[in-house]
Image (spheres, rainbow, N blue to C red):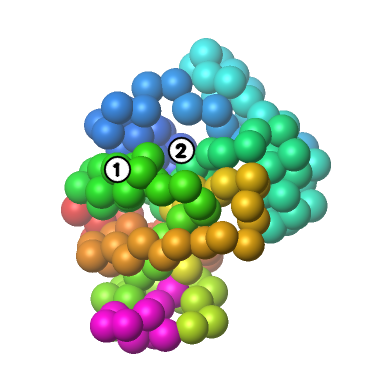
Amino acid sequence: MAVCRGQPLIHHLLGALRAVGVIAPTVATSPWVPETTRLVESMGLDVLQTPGKGYAEDIGWITQRLPQFVCVAGDIPFPPVVELTRFLEAAEHSRSSVVGLLPERLRLTQLTPGPRWPHEVPPFGPCRIVGVNRVDVLDPDDKETFVFRDPWIGAAVTTPADLEWIAENAP
């Protein structure tokens, strides 16, 4: 519910999803964000209420209910439509989980860095994990990587300073 450019972050994200043809996403919330749950329900969207034990734990909880899904983290308010389109097309043709990565050299250094991918990704080198992934629980050990090209796909709001910088600088 943090406000960026006069609207809650989720409004910006939902606008980007609509632009790529995702009209009625299911929104995962937790008991920790009741205002977000109410807002999403008032928009007529489906809500999947997770236990709220943390990102990884909640993704695991979702996998027990949905065998495959694409996750777009709610803290990325301005994901580039071109990048979302590329990712969704790749995910549609994959038969495994797809981990979204951003080369370290493209990371917006003004923002709090996300987690690093533990392996080098030739020819891109070190990468950061982006909150855009396809999860396939049918074979949890089988993972592909997808490398994004636009640094704004990794522009997540982690701190108030991140929110302020993104509000001032996002395209």
Residue appearing at x 65%, y 34% in the figure: 66
**Seen in the image, is 94 located left or right of residue 151?**
right
Amino acid type at image mark 2: Ile
Would residue 104 be visible to someone looking at this image?
A: no
Question: Where does the N terminus fall, quadrant-wise?
Answer: top right
Span shown in magenta: 120-128
Rendering coords of residue 134 (x, y %):
49, 48
Q: Which tag, 1 or 2, sits closer to the chain's start?
A: 2
The answer to whether 153 is drawn above or below residue 12 in the figure is: below
Residue appearing at x 53%, y 82% in the figure: 118
| Quarter where residue 18 is shown | top left
Amino acid type at image mark 1: Glu
Residue appearing at x 32%, y 82% in the figure: 122
**Seen in the image, is 56 located left or right of residue 78?**
right
The answer to whether 31 is drawn above or below residue 135 in the figure is: above
Q: CA distance from mark 1 to mark 2?
A: 23 Å
| Quarter where residue 130 is shown | bottom left
- Nearer the observer, disc 1 or disc 2? 1
Rendering coords of residue 83 (x, y %):
26, 51
Would residue 170 be visible to someone looking at this image?
A: yes
Question: Would you name the residue on which mark 2 appears?
Answer: 10
Question: Would you name the residue on which mark 1 appears?
Answer: 89
Magenta stretch encompasses residue 66: no
Q: Residues within 10 Å of mark 2 (few under 14, many from 20)?
A: many
Rendering coords of residue 145 (x, y %):
42, 65
Asked which secondary structure carries label 2, the reply is: helix
